[in-house]
């Protein structure tokens, strides 16, 4: 018989697990849905001293009281912090830790760092600094979306979420998590909610980038599941979640493969393109055509976030080198820059990097500064919003390839970075959009939102479809269909620069 300890996220309590706990119980499992001090219907037990350590002690006491020799601990969202803290103190009693749409906090990380919405994050920081503020009110009905996607939650359950939510003790979010390292040796399962912007493909890409934070995920004791729902699967898909938890407890789930010697982003470009002279100025590379007069330029903006210590940096990735050379071979200046989008909090800084790079390029005497295109890729697509919202006269085209065109639900960005809204102000600016058919569901939704808005405002959008293309197809799908799509997109952009 499996014993589960279920720990919910901020503002909630054990009540959110009612349906999941019932289904686990029907399978023969022993289930402990936890309401931590000061949360849920125990809100009257909180005080200024209620912090993360309080919640860790709650769970340690429960583990000590449970008769089963081992328990499976499930932490949802904020709940993973006290789960890890308690498991670190009682590792011999924990069979597995399940991260339910939760982050991977490390020693010294406060839960506040994982709050996705930067406006909420900053508000909590101000509350921490304000004397006498020791709790924060739960979100309103519309505000829950800022803490994670509410996709799939029935209206009645969402109303209950609002009605039964309780203030969160601020110290639970601001006190750093302290770990001895004992928890790192325990089996782990990640349950990713795809409508909230997380999926296995994204995790595999982060591992492939060489981010040291994700190396532990290759361990065969680590498994993954996906649920096609939002951030609160215990309310939206309780049957499916219960089944996944049982399978996780049994050690099932997807295992990440050890990255090949050549990760996907470092494989060869799908086209043979001639080499062109490349000049490097700071974070900017220029691929130069044979020309006796100033030429138009195409500035490529890579995706992300890309961890700061990844080597080589994006401007040396074969796909971007290939694009730069190809543009230069056709008579324009290809430009690639390394912007500093290393974390979700870095979009404003990355936007500044793009703007500075554009001005540097336009000032180059070999560039016709009145004929420039910006080409955004993947997560860099969000950086197109500023340019769509107020296109300067020299911007002749915006292109986007498998882009994210609205912030993913768990990214917590301001509306500044929402091209799906900004496109309504783009006017006659030509837009070339390359769309892949095998896109992740969460990203495909943002593209759909963008195209709907573009149609409503009669924006000039050319869509180039690759029905069998993957995200990152330039180094994955060496098909004739993909090669034709790249050629068509490049020539479409250059056509707008020449007109």
Image: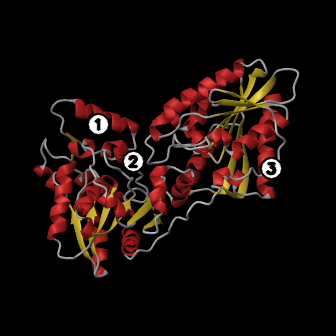
Q: Is residue 226 left or right of residue 465?
A: left
- The residue singled out by tag 1 in the image is 124
Q: Secondary structure at mark 1?
A: helix
Where residue 356 sits, quadrant-wise, is top right
Residue 497 in the image: state x and y as whole percent. Answer: 79, 30
- The residue singled out by tag 2 in the image is 145
Q: Are marks 1 and 2 in contact (CB under 8 Å)?
A: no
Q: Secondary structure at mark 3?
A: loop
Picture residue at 40% right of the left edge, 44% below the top: 116
Query: Depth check: 412 or 419 in front?
Result: 412
Disc with the residue nearer the chain's start (2 vs 3):
2
* Of marks 1 and 2, the one in the foreground: 1
Judge whether 301 appears above or below 166 on screen.
above
**Residue 140 seen anywhere in this rendered image of the structure:** no
Spatial separation of the CA atoms under disc 1 and disc 2: 17 Å
Q: Secondary structure at mark 2?
A: helix
Picture residue at 11% right of the left edge, 51% below the top: 45
Disc with the residue nearer the chain's start (1 vs 2):
1
Q: Is residue 341 left or right of residue 91?
A: right
Where residue 367 sits, quadrant-wise, is top right
Disc with the residue nearer the chain's start (1 vs 3):
1
- The residue singled out by tag 3 in the image is 271
* Of marks 2 and 3, the one in the foreground: 3
Q: Is residue 142 left or right of residue 59?
A: right
* Of marks 1 and 3, the one in the foreground: 3
Spatial separation of the CA atoms under disc 1 and disc 3: 49 Å
Picture residue at 57% right of the left edge, 56% below the top: 440
Label 3 neighbour load within 10 Å: few <14, some 14-19, many 20+? many
Q: Is residue 164 left or right of residue 106?
A: left
């Amino acid at each position: 018989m499996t014993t589960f300890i279920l720990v919910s996220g901020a503002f909630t309590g054990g009540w959110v697990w009612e349906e999941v706990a019932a289904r686990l119980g029907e399978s023969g499992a022993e289930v402990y849905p936890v309401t931590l001090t000061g949360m849920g219907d125990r809100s009257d037990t909180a005080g200024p001293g209620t912090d993360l350590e309080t919640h860790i002690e709650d769970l340690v006491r429960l583990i000590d009281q449970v008769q089963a020799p081992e328990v499976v601990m499930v932490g949802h969202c904020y709940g993973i912090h006290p789960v890890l803290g308690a498991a670190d103190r009682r590792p011999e009693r924990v069979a597995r830790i399940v991260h339910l749409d939760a982050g991977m906090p490390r020693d010294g990380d406060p839960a506040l760092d994982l709050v996705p919405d930067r406006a909420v994050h900053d508000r909590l920081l101000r509350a921490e600094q304000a004397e006498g503020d020791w709790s924060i009110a739960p979100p309103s009905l519309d505000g829950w979306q800022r803490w994670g996607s509410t996709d799939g939650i029935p209206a009645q359950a969402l109303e209950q979420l609002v009605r039964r939510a309780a203030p969160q003790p601020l110290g639970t979010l601001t006190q750093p998590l302290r770990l001895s390292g004992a928890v790192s040796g325990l089996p782990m399962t990640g349950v990713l909610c795809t409508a909230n912007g997380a999926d296995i493909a994204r995790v595999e890409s982060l591992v492939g980038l060489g981010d040291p934070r994700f190396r532990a995920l290759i361990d065969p004791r680590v498994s993954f599941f996906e649920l096609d729902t939002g951030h609160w699967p215990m309310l939206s898909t309780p049957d499916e979640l219960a089944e996944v938890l049982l399978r996780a407890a049994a050690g099932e789930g997807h295992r990440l493969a050890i990255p090949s010697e050549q990760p996907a982003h470092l494989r060869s470009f799908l086209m043979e393109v001639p080499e062109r002279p490349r000049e490097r100025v700071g974070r900017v590379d220029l691929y130069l055509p044979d020309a006796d007069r100033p030429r138009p330029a195409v500035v490529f903006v890579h995706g992300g976030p890309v961890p700061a210590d990844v080597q080589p940096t994006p401007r040396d990735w074969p796909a971007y080198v290939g694009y730069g050379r190809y543009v230069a071979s056709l008579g324009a200046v290809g430009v690639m820059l390394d912007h500093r989008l290393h974390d979700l909090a870095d979009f404003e800084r990355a936007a500044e990097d793009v703007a500075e790079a554009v001005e540097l390029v336009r000032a180059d005497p070999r560039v016709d500064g009145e004929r420039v295109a910006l080409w955004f890729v993947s997560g860099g697509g969000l950086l197109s919003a500023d340019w769509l919202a107020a296109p300067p006269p020299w911007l002749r085209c915006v292109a986007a390839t498998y882009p994210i065109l609205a912030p993913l639900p768990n990214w917590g960005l301001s509306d500044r970075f929402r091209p799906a809204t900004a496109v309504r102000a783009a006017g006659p600016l030509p837009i070339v959009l390359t769309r892949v058919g095998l896109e992740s569901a969460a990203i495909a939704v943002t593209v759909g939102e963008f195209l709907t808005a573009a149609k409503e405002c009669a924006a000039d959008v050319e869509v180039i479809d690759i029905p069998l293309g993957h995200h990152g197809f330039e180094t994955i799908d060496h098909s004739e269909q993909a090669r034709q799509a790249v050629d068509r997109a490049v020539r479409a952009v250059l056509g707008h620069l020449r007109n």
